Image (tube, coloured by chain):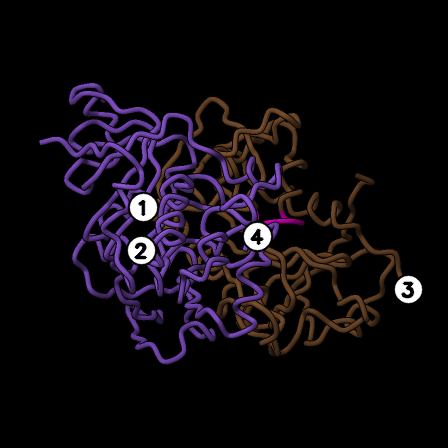
Chain colours: A purple, B brown
Amino acid sequence: MDKRIADLAEAVAGIPDNATVMIGGFGGSGAPIELIHALIDRYLATGSPKNLTVINNNAGNGHVGIAAMIEQGMVAKMVCSFPRSADPRVFTEKYLAGEIALELVPQGTLAERIRAGGAGIPAFYTPTGFGTDLAKGKPVAEFDGRSYVQERWLRADFALIKAEIGDHLGNLTYRMAARNFAPLMATAATRTIAQVSQVVEPGGIDPEAVVTPGIFVDAVVSVPHPAQEEDLNRAKVTHPEVAA
Amino acid sequence: MTTRLSNAQIAWRAAQDIADGAYVNLGIGFPEMVARFQPEGRQAVFHTENGILGFGEAPQPGEEDWDLINAGKKAVTIKPGTAFFHHADSFAMVRGGHLDVAILGAYQVAQNGDLANWSTGPKGVPAVGGAMDLVHGAKRVAVLTDHTTKDGKPKLVQQCTLPLTGVGCVTRIYTSLAVVDVEDGRFVLREKLAAVSLDELQSLTGAPLHIDGSVADLTVPEV
């Protein structure tokens, strides 16, 4: 078994129109910028994939990464907890113009919905959101005298994540707080594609140090020096180079 | 108008109630200041929703590592004992009752402990982040706030008029004039600035302030 894929374009080639795509990252930390940009390049060359539903904590910052996907018009809907950032103009303008849908989910509920999706749990109860606008229309129940909101799992066709070290079998480690949603998303997508800073032979990761076991990962693509969204934004980079 | 505590002074007062070794989540912005005022000899362990426990102070400019940020997307540092974890573990710490205290800002707090701090209404792009999770599960949920809005309206109210973050969740409120507990569906005044009279304080508060025993002077150094 060897899950390595030679290049980024090949890694994202199978993502079709109308797909639901989980994208790792909290703000810029953990954002798989190179995979996202490969997907944008494919869209610019072929017109596909479009009409995507994207699941991420945020809704992009500046004109790179998820913001650039939204700017190009590839995204029909965002599922996120905090669609604001230092430079949220791209999402804000599309949202206020009615050109993109938003499902707003409390951050911990977003994480748990993804975890549940990956674990085969179709719904669960959480105290989060009880009695608030974000629980409207959802079933509630009382357990041991306290009220809880029923939330449903989240699953996706694809997950695009960034990890630090990956072996040929898809075992992954992460770098500091870049881990955030990635281990959850890896479990909840039909096909999980990981960009990694370093590819090693099986045995190159101490089994005690594996965070995401390879069973959750379908493809590993090497990106030795990944860009940081924050650095790109500080340098006023856009993708593609001249924003549409 | 009576002199009020600055935000830093409110944060100082809140910091005095944090025990050594407490696990603490500080909300983005004003509540983050609490970390600066830990009393000598006490060390809290700070949690950030994006997956770090026991992080250190901000790095020097130019030394940021953007994989090492807090929930406000600001760069932090690691120190001996720091731990990283994924988002489901992070919110298990929050909802599962493992945090000793969560400290948040507020637009309004009601006398039954309802909190409104995420939305000022239907305009613009809604964003909630972890606020609705943080108000459930921590053993204490404390609010830091000016006692009134900029135009003088009470922020401590009978019933919130803004969209709720959580129902009956707040346990203590540190304001620019007083320290108020939420107990049995009512505000109980614990401390107030000596310079503000009870009548004046009540006139700036949107629901009755109850007194249970005595009210201490709220004394805070210049910070």
Query: How far, Cα to Cα, is label 2 from label 1?
Result: 7 Å
Q: Chain of mark 2?
A: A
The magenta span reads B25-31
Counting from the top left corner in percent of width and height, residue A63 is at 54, 49
Query: How far, Cα to Cα, is label 4 from label 1?
Result: 21 Å
Q: Amino acid at mark 1?
A: Leu
Counting from the top left corner in percent of width and height, residue B175 is at 71, 58
Front: mark 3 or 4: 4
Residue hosting label 4: A85
Residue hosting label 1: A160
Q: Amino acid at mark 3?
A: Met
Front: mark 4 or 1: 1
Label placed on residue A21 = 2
Q: Are marks 2 and 1 in contact (CB under 8 Å)?
A: yes
Residue hosting label 3: B1
Front: mark 4 or 2: 2
Q: Chain of mark 3?
A: B
Mark 2 neighbour density, 10 Å: few (under 14) some (14–19) many (20 or more):
many
Query: How far, Cα to Cα, is label 4 from label 2?
Result: 21 Å
Write down the quadrant of residue A34 in the picture.
top left
